[in-house]
Amino acid sequence: MRRAWGSVGGAFIVGSAIALAACAPDPSDANTGSEVYQASCASCHGANGGGGAGPALDDGVLVAKYTDAEMAGVIRNGALTMAAVPGLTDEQIAAVMAFLRAEF
Ligand code: HEC
């Protein structure tokens, strides 16, 4: 009887940890370009692209300046004073670039 309760409790704790991890605002959970932008870019470029610590992107000038391959390099490796944005997958980078080109 004791052992049975022990294993039920263990399963509950593991289940809770997975549920908590799923709720954490982790950039790696961002799927759409908009989510990636808000999680990884908005802190510097503004929630609506109006700029902040980084330049405004919403006038489309900086977005139009680069091909996708070049902009992926900006995101992965940084550019001039912009630090590299770590931890994004190729899919997330493609999604955020499509978002930038569609919105800005
Ligand atoms: C820690 C702050 C910060 C974050 C986070 C950030 N940027 Fe930047 N970004 C900058 C700064 C500062 C510049 C200006 C770089 C320069 O020209 O010196 C910049 C420049 C750029 C440029 C133009 C590069 C150029 O020619 O000047 C693009 C495009 C860009 N960022 C896209 C992004 C995208 C997309 C993300 C999210 C994946 C992102 N940035 C996240 C700070 C940031």
Image (cartoon, rainbow, N blue to C red):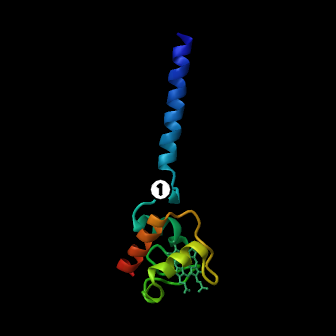
Give the total number of marks visible in the rendering. Answer: 1
x%, y% of residue 52? 55, 79
Q: Quadrant of residue 61?
A: bottom left
Query: Does ligand 1 reach within 8 Å of label 1's beta carbon?
Result: no
Q: Position of residue 14 (x, y in %)?
A: 53, 34
Q: Which residue is mark 1?
A: 29
Residue at the image point whose x is 58% and y is 70% from the top:
85
Residue at 64 percent across and 82 percent down: it is 81
Q: Residues within 10 Å of mark 1 (few under 14, many from 20)?
A: some
Q: Is 7 drawn above or below residue 100 in the view shown?
A: above
Q: Please identify the residue farthest to the top as the structure is shown.
A: 1
Give the residue furthest to the left: 102
Residue 38 in the image, given as x and y percentages of width and height = 47, 67
Question: Which quarter of the figure is the C terminus placed in?
Answer: bottom left
Give the structural element (helix, strand or loop) at label 1.
helix
When the figure is inspected, residue 27 is found, relative to residue 64, above or below; the finding is above
Name the residue at 50% across, 84% down.
Answer: 56
Mark 1 residue type: Asp
Q: Residue 73: give x, y in percent of width and height.
A: 55, 77
What residue is drawn where x is 42% and y is 86%? 60
Given residues 49 and 80, the one toward you in this image is 80
* Vertical position of residue 100 compared to residue 14: above or below: below
